[in-house]
Image (spheres, helix red, strand yellow):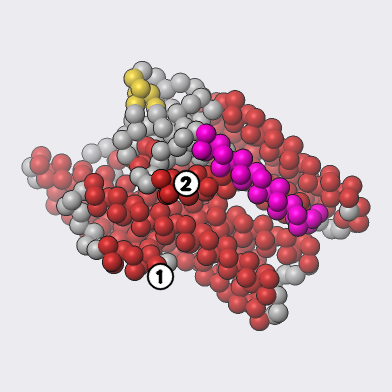
Amino acid sequence: MPAEEEFTRFRMLCTFLGLLFYLLDIGSDFLLSVQYFRSGHVTWAVLTLVFVLVGSVCIQIFSYEWFEDDKEIDEKDDKGLSTCHLIGIHALQIGICTRYLHLLKKSFKAQKKQSELVDHATDLSFKAQKKQSELIGLATDLSMLRMFETFLESIPQLILQTYIILEHNHRSNLQYISMAVSFLTIAWATVDYRRCLRQSLTYLNKMPIGMPTAVYLSYKIFTITPRILSLTLFIMLSTFSTVAMACIWLLGTIYAFLEETSFCTSRALEHLYRAVVGVILIFTFFNIKGENTKVHMTLYYIFNLCHNLSAPILLFLLKPESERTDYFLPILFFILVSNLMGLGFLGLYYSLLHPRGPGRKKIGDEMDGMDEVDGMAHEPRTRLERFLQI
């Protein structure tokens, strides 16, 4: 089996780190909310917990449905989890931890047996290959869920904590720890999902470690970070700016409905998926349908750049006293430079470093619903092939 198609020890380490980041992210936010309660900032505490709860509930719903879908597809499923058991662990909000532990346990067993299977007959080698594919699929499911959690919890959490620091000058070590963990989660989840997805789909070239990964990460970080800062400035200008953010979310959700995504097996869950897509579109671009996205991506980032730059300008015009603060000019400079750097890395990645497969057309982003392999239309067959591409 080619090395890139194996669930390696490095992939096991990544799974363990993913679990660690998840626990640190949730734990630091929970401790921060307790700190706010104790200091009398009830609103901040409630908002911190609400973001944690919303993100957790959404990913538990998807996790449960995917467990059920996989059980229906494979009647010989060996997870050993009954429907009642699945409902219980997801109601307790530990479905993701269960997935992590389940994957680590199975990958450890697979690594232990790997040396024994190498020298056996072809049928055993086939079984080993099937097991490796299953492990990669489980890892990709986890990366999908973590990516959802990142945009539903970690990024909104960063906006909230940045607002509290800038507008109310309230700072604490736990705040900084929570923000640092959220930022690491964003970076980790974005790249980990990208790499897992490309590894799980056999008709796509794998994403190499090194320069392509570093440039792709830089593209996402340098476009998402100024987005977080600009939205924070809008909220500082007026809390009614959240209505405008809701309108952007609504537009993104409508876009997902118009594209007629077909990711989920049930209509209700598909609607939830499209709502989550709307949230992600507030912060970054991705393709949700099998279409050329160069124009869509260009228009998206033009709007994104203008909207980001308008935040400090409006704050200066409507709240002139903000110019005298110690954060105004650094944030203005960072938003401008970071956006330009992010767009530069975007162009560099898709023009020179994007790992396209043979015969793949040079488009702005990959396709979600359909792809081309050797010039032939490739219809989606699995959950992985119907999922979004960021």
Q: Amino acid at mark 2?
A: His
Q: Is residue 293 above or below residue 329?
A: above
Q: Is residue 74 above or below residue 96?
A: above
The reply to whether callout 2 and callout 1 are in contact (CB within 8 Å) is no
Depth check: give the residue in front, 346 or 149.
149
Q: Choose the circle earlier in sequence order: 2 or 1.
A: 1
In percent of the image, x 70 and y 80: which residue is there? 39
In percent of the image, x 61 and y 46: which residue is there? 249
**Image coords of residue 282 (percent x, y):** 62, 45
Q: Is residue 296 left or right of residue 56?
A: right
Are there few (<14), some (14-19), or many (20+) residues within 10 Å of tag 1?
few
Q: Is residue 244 magenta?
A: yes
Real-space CA distance between mark 2 and mark 1, rounded to the nearest whole angstrom: 24 Å
Quadrant placement of the N terminus: top left
Are there few (<14), some (14-19), or many (20+) residues within 10 Å of tag 2?
some
**Image coords of residue 98 (percent x, y):** 34, 64
Depth check: give the residue in front, 378 or 25.
378
Question: In this picture, which residue range is highlighted in magenta?
Answer: 235-258
* Location of mark 2 (residue): 271
The quarter of the picture where residue 217 lies is top right
Q: Main secondary structure of the magenta part?
A: helix
Instruction: Tell me, yes or no, if residue 267 can be seen here.
Output: yes
Q: Is residue 382 magenta?
A: no
Count of labels shown? 2
Q: Amino acid at mark 1?
A: Leu
* Location of mark 1 (residue): 92
Query: Farthest residue toward the top?
Result: 375
**Image coords of residue 222 (percent x, y):** 64, 43
In percent of the image, x 32 and y 47: which residue is there? 137
